[in-house]
Image (cartoon, coloured by chain):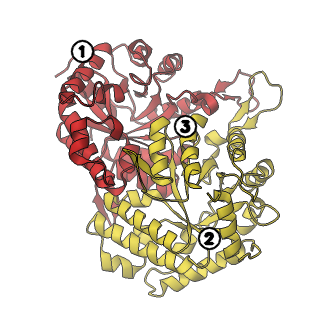
Chain colours: A red, B yellow
């Protein structure tokens, strides 16, 4: 089975960019033609609008980027119909040759964590039969519950050549409330280190359990572009960990802020942009797909170019 | 609007017990008659089996307990059909007069967190119209991202008289990996305190923003029955916080372990049991509903009785 980090590295080299397009459909920002055609009279119609919008975005960016990241929350907000839309756009992205990262920030313990993990990644098993559910290549997870709770996600990922991205340093302004708390090792005399570095250390250990030939593990770290100093520090401390860097673009992270996320060969990080690519212009403009394509090309141009390997 | 903690306290007094029944359908443990009738040839048939099982459990326990807690992961494992089942059983529980707590452990930032929160609690809004989605009375959330990320959940809960339960001390064996890390206040000379107590302190502050007349806030804390010492400490430190105590029953938490969770008047905590109630006997026994009822009555008898207020 092909290792997740190698699949990512190959896709990044093939497309020549580490850009990940976030699929965060927001009703009030959708192109007017789509809002008008579907209407918002029911959750089903909104879900259909989300599906059409994301499908057309996927078609526009499929040749330009290696990976897309649907945000589960926006689909769940439409109830069961939204989850049908999510399944369909994940399917479309795969068919267009894109890797898929489901942003669900899931977390739980034991067999409950297995249910989330298998749904997202390896497929669920009932009475000995395996059923694919979301079939994503990777899933974001929250580490607060500790290793034994992360373990089922690793196991599911490792059954299917998938990956897991663990929240380490999130991109929001208040991320530091808990993530920056200074932890002292009991009995230790060394100066303390912030909580997110302890989480990072655990992520590194998990990643090193299963390295791809590119030198990166199948457990990545989510590190916000909005914290460039932490990003640089983490790159130094976690040489084998693939980063997912949100917060680039609309959230304020700039291209120079994310440079530190990469290894010297340009690999080692995926940089996500959602709103700046999905909603770059006037929703009334019928040529919105051209603006999506241009915004994608602009983001690609702003990020490091990775030497093309066909 | 009626305050969430008052609604919980009244329901606990009306039923005379703080027992919460967890709805965690597991295919391999379902009664044979249900597995046989629906079969496991598709995710749709498994979802239908989950719905029938949970519906019949709800009918059996509706007069005995104040609240049920469906575990989102098991429904998501069946894809969109599972979410239809989840919606239907939440609806049935409400119709039977039960409070509902959706166990989703959600977390994200800004408008993404709002999407999760509104789907679970107040209802989502598109083009100025509000649509109910899961319509739960409360949702579990993960605190790792900090206050600004928890805020959208509080806002949604406060728009509909709902509640939020924040993970503080989880019930798994490895919970301490991060939750027990000792945190020192910068520049402080006091001895450090474990991370979960810092999270607990934040939860107390959030709860105190909006107290019900029972003296409890609309922000609760998840504290595992498997850590009775921590549970007792937290009860002392968080007098205004409603606890959700998982881990009772199949996970090993005993009745004497959870006694410390309650205030002297018997309020202040909901104690969840899932497997011990759902799957108490032989799956081949056609009288399984009687066993579910007996297991519920046994759990009620083992927990403190709350003086009945009609």
Task: Give the residue displayed 55% in from the left and 30% down from the top.
Answer: A201
The residue to which callout 1 is attached is A307
Specify the quadrant that holds the N terminus of chain B.
bottom right
Element under disc 1: loop
Task: Give the residue displayed 45% in from the left and 68% down from the top.
Answer: B91
Task: Give x and y (percent) for residue B87.
Answer: 41, 63
| Residue B118 shows up from this direction | yes
Residue B51 in the figure: left or right of residue B306: left
Task: Give the residue displayed 38% in from the left and 24% down from the top.
Answer: A269
Task: Give x and y (percent) for residue A156.
Answer: 38, 48
The one of A299 and B170 positioned closer to us in this rendering: A299
Task: Give x and y (percent) for residue B274.
Answer: 55, 67
- Pointer 3 chain: B
Residue A78 in the figure: left or right of residue A11: right
* CA distance separating discs 1 and 3: 38 Å
**Tag 3 and tag 2 share a subunit:** yes
The residue to which callout 2 is attached is B66
- Pointer 1 chain: A
């Amino acid at each position: 089975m092909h290792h997740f980090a190698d699949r990512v590295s190959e896709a990044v080299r093939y497309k020549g960019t580490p850009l990940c397009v976030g699929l965060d459909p927001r009703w009030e920002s959708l192109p007017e033609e789509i809002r008008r055609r579907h209407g918002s009279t029911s959750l089903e119609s909104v879900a259909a609008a989300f599906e059409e919008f994301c499908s057309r975005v996927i078609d526009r960016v499929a040749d330009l980027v290696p990976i897309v990241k649907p945000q589960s929350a926006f689909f769940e907000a439409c109830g069961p119909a939204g989850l049908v839309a999510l399944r369909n756009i994940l399917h479309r992205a795969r068919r267009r040759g894109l890797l898929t990262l489901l942003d669900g920030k899931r977390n739980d313990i034991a067999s409950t964590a297995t249910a989330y993990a298998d749904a997202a990644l390896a497929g669920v098993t009932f009475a000995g039969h395996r059923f694919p559910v979301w079939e994503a290549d990777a899933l974001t997870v929250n580490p607060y519950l500790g290793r034994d709770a992360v373990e089922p996600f690793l196991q599911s990922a490792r059954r299917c050549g998938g990956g897991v991205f663990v929240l380490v340093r999130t991109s929001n302004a208040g991320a530091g409330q808990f993530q920056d708390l200074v932890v002292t090792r009991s009995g230790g005399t060394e100066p303390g280190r912030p909580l997110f570095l302890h989480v990072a250390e655990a992520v590194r250990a998990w990643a090193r359990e299963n390295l791809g030939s590119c030198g990166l593990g199948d457990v990545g770290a989510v590190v916000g572009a909005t914290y460039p100093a932490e990003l640089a520090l983490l790159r130094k401390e976690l040489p084998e960990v693939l980063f997912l860097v949100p917060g680039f673009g609309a959230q304020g992270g700039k291209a120079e802020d994310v440079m530190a996320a990469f290894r010297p060969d340009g690999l080692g990080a995926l940089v996500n942009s959602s709103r700046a690519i999905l909603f770059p212009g006037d929703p009334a403009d019928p040529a919105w797909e051209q603006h999506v394509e241009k915004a994608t090309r602009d983001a690609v141009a702003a990020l490091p170019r990775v030497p093309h390997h066909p």
